[in-house]
Amino acid sequence: MMDAPGSAAGVAVPSKETAVFTSPFPDVEIPDVSIYDDLFAGLTRDDSARVALIDPASGAETTYGALKAQIDAFAGALAAHGVGTETVLGLLCPNVPAFATVFHGVLRAGATVTTINSLYTAGEIEKQLRDAGASWVITVSLLLPQAQQAADAVGIPTERLIVLDGAEGHPGLRGLLGEGRAAPEVSFDPATHVAVLPYSSGTTGIPKGVMLSHRNLVANVAQCRININLTSADRVLAVLPFFHIYGMTVLLNLALKQRATLVTMPRFDLVQFLTNIQTYRCTYLFIAPPIAVALAKHPIVDEFDISTVHTVFSGAAPLDGETADIAGRRINARVMQGYGMSELSPVSHAMPYTRDDVPVSSVGTILPNIVCKLVDTETGEEITAIEEDGRTRPGELWVKGPNVMLGYLNKPEATAETLDAEGFLHTGDVAVYHEGGYFSIVDRVKELIKYKGYQIAPAELEALLLGHPRIMDAAVIGVLDDDRQEIPKAFIVAAPDSALTAEEVTAFVADNVAPHKKIRRVEFIDAIPKSTSGKILRKDLRAREQAD
């Protein structure tokens, strides 16, 4: 397994000699410790008494001291049942306080956790468990049917399927904590030991396991602290899923590091979202663009007192500046934006809270300990020159720093395509650099679709569609809906005289994938445009869409 790239030094101003862009902030220290030690080893008596988590469903509060004790006890129980540094556990769980206990308990035990989308079907769960090499599954009773089916398919026995809130025949969280075992002594290299395996589509293709080390997670928390003004006085509404790398690092880990309070939400519901803000006096919101649209436009927002909110931070997909401005003015809060991807643990850019001159339409400045390149997608030339309009011409964004992944699990070729010999990760996103020191994302090289912050690989949907007996050929691209949010659209070549309908196509896909992967629009065409090598020409389909 390769080592994570170290932090990179560089000059403060981009030039043709260096061809790199550096952060406006000095490098920060990245402790050489596990993520558990980084977050909990320094817990003081005062910190221990602070509230770490609130469960709106019950009103129950968990202090930092209680959370640490639960994490240690869960780690001890896992170790006693054979979990060690070579073990991979699948975690299929919505945002509930117990997520923090078991997620960090697995890491404290020295094992690896692969977080699974709570909306996945049994088949999708099975694929991830099998690919990750998971030998345990942790879930909740609500998701047990699909978890059980997937576990059975990959050969995970009942005694290794933990149901946190209890289910007959399965170990539960209360019982495991009740064993009263001390956390184990474990030894590993934080720089190379895989802590988490989220799944990402990268720049294209089928989802792959992203190997993130303890150092990757520790580094990104340290880097984010510089641009994101989260403090122990904040109450954070945790609606973005912890299983997604954005929620994992920026909500869960960063909030815990800063000793803030997390108010958990298992799923998004606008009324409940607003109710929780009002009831628990939340101050900081981490959201995806669809929530910003609701804050900007939905009339029900005016019926709630959410005046305690001072900052809204949007990520996971691009947020247009106009929507951000409207939302910010409406709720009298500062709206900020950042950029990242799973392979970056995930944040590489964020609007700095110390500056008011960085427009919300941008993704902000480079975080500390990171250097970037902009590379012409046609010529490979490295771009540094500022044009007359005060910015560079567009180029693919390359990122290097201690938050860059180790690689894709068991995918050396895909790793080599994304992570070069110098340690630069090729993001697949096209950006421009502004003379004010900030970046904007302007286009995409990669084929990935971002629907409500979730990644969708066109190739995965196309493979599914081609399995339909009345579909001869298919292609999928992202198009914009009426709210300017990206949705999947399928172009279908139907079998002759099949009388296939768009409704049948959408229903077929919906029966086989998680809800966010559903096809939202269908168009029947005579032939899918392809190159001489047989590759789908998505640019031709996008041009067709724009012409319509």
Image: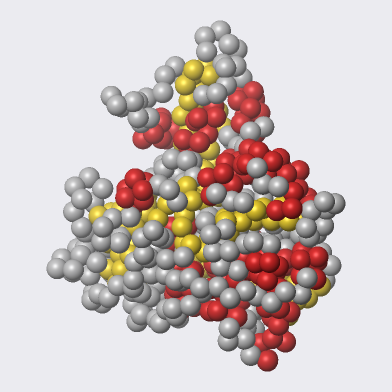
Left/right placement of residue 427 relative to residue 75 reads left
Quarter location, residue 2: bottom left
The type of colouring in the image is secondary structure
Q: Residue furthest bottom?
A: 45
Q: Position of residue 20 (x, y in %)?
A: 24, 66
Q: Nearer the viewer, residue 396 or 213?
A: 213
Q: Nearer the viewer, residue 77 or 428?
A: 77
Q: Residue furthest top?
A: 497
Left/right placement of residue 72 relative to residue 22 reads right
In the rendered image, which quarter contains the C terminus?
top left
Q: Position of residue 73 (x, y in %)?
A: 71, 73
- Count the marks: 0
Left/right placement of residue 382 relative to residue 365 reads left
- Residue positioned 62% across, 74% down in the render: 184
- Residue positioned 30% across, 53% down in the render: 396
Q: Residue furthest left?
A: 17
Q: Nearer the viewer, residue 402 or 135?
A: 135
Say if residue 280 shows up in the picture: no
Left/right placement of residue 366 relative to residue 275 reads left
Q: Nearer the viewer, residue 259 or 167?
A: 167
In the rendered image, which quarter contains the N terminus?
bottom left
Q: Position of residue 173 (x, y in %)?
A: 77, 64
Say if residue 535 shows up in the picture: yes
- Residue positioned 74% across, 53% down in the render: 159
Q: Position of residue 301 (x, y in %)?
A: 71, 62
Quarter location, residue 260: bottom right
Q: Is residue 81 above or below residue 376?
A: below
- Residue positioned 54% across, 27% down in the render: 465
